[in-house]
Amino acid sequence: MANFNPYIDKIDMDFWRELCAKEGKLCLYKKGDYFLHCGDITRNVWGFIKKGYFKYSVTDSEGNTHITGFSFCDTPLGDYSSLVLKTPAVTDIIAATDAEVLVCNRNIVDELFEKDFKLH
């Protein structure tokens, strides 16, 4: 899946992996479970996938669902713009397989953003 999500190359994966390993809680998701619902401002905002993968989808005004992206094993999981801007998520994030995710609470990430503006 090289270059499937090219933005990944611009993210310090070690930083987020270590943060989630240190501060996160292992959460199990069954296929079809939601990590995030469109319109929610998230409590558990950032995760790192240990096993499985997730799909990002949106529903148009006619009720049709469109897949807009994927996050795979050993990559971050979440709606980064919603996290930074504290706005409602614009996508659903749904487990496409049974999955394991190290999930960090929003408060931990918010504290880091307050301390280091470069993370934005």
Image (cartoon, rainbow, N blue to C red):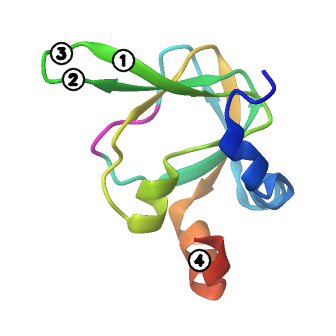
Within the magenta stretch, is there residue 112? no
Amino acid, disc 2: Asp
| Of residues 94 and 65, the one drawn nearer to the viewer in this rendering | 65
Q: How crowded is mark 4: few (under 14 residues within 10 Å), some or many (20 or more)?
A: some
Amino acid, disc 3: Gly
Q: x%, y% of residue 65?
A: 31, 15
Q: Which residue is under mark 2?
A: 60
Q: Judging from the image, what secondary structure is the residue with disc 2 in?
A: loop
Q: Which residue is under mark 4?
A: 113
Q: Judging from the image, what secondary structure is the residue with disc 4 in?
A: helix
Q: Judging from the image, what secondary structure is the residue with disc 1 in?
A: strand
Q: Which residue is under mark 1?
A: 66
Q: x%, y% of residue 32?
A: 48, 15
Our reading of the magenta stretch's main secondary structure is loop
Q: Distance between the residues labelled 1 and 4?
A: 32 Å
Q: x%, y% of residue 107?
A: 53, 70
| Highlighted range, magenta | 35-39
Amino acid, disc 1: His
Q: How crowded is mark 3: few (under 14 residues within 10 Å), some or many (20 or more)?
A: few
Q: How crowded is mark 1: few (under 14 residues within 10 Å), some or many (20 or more)?
A: few
Label whose residue precedes the other's in the sequence (1 or 4) = 1
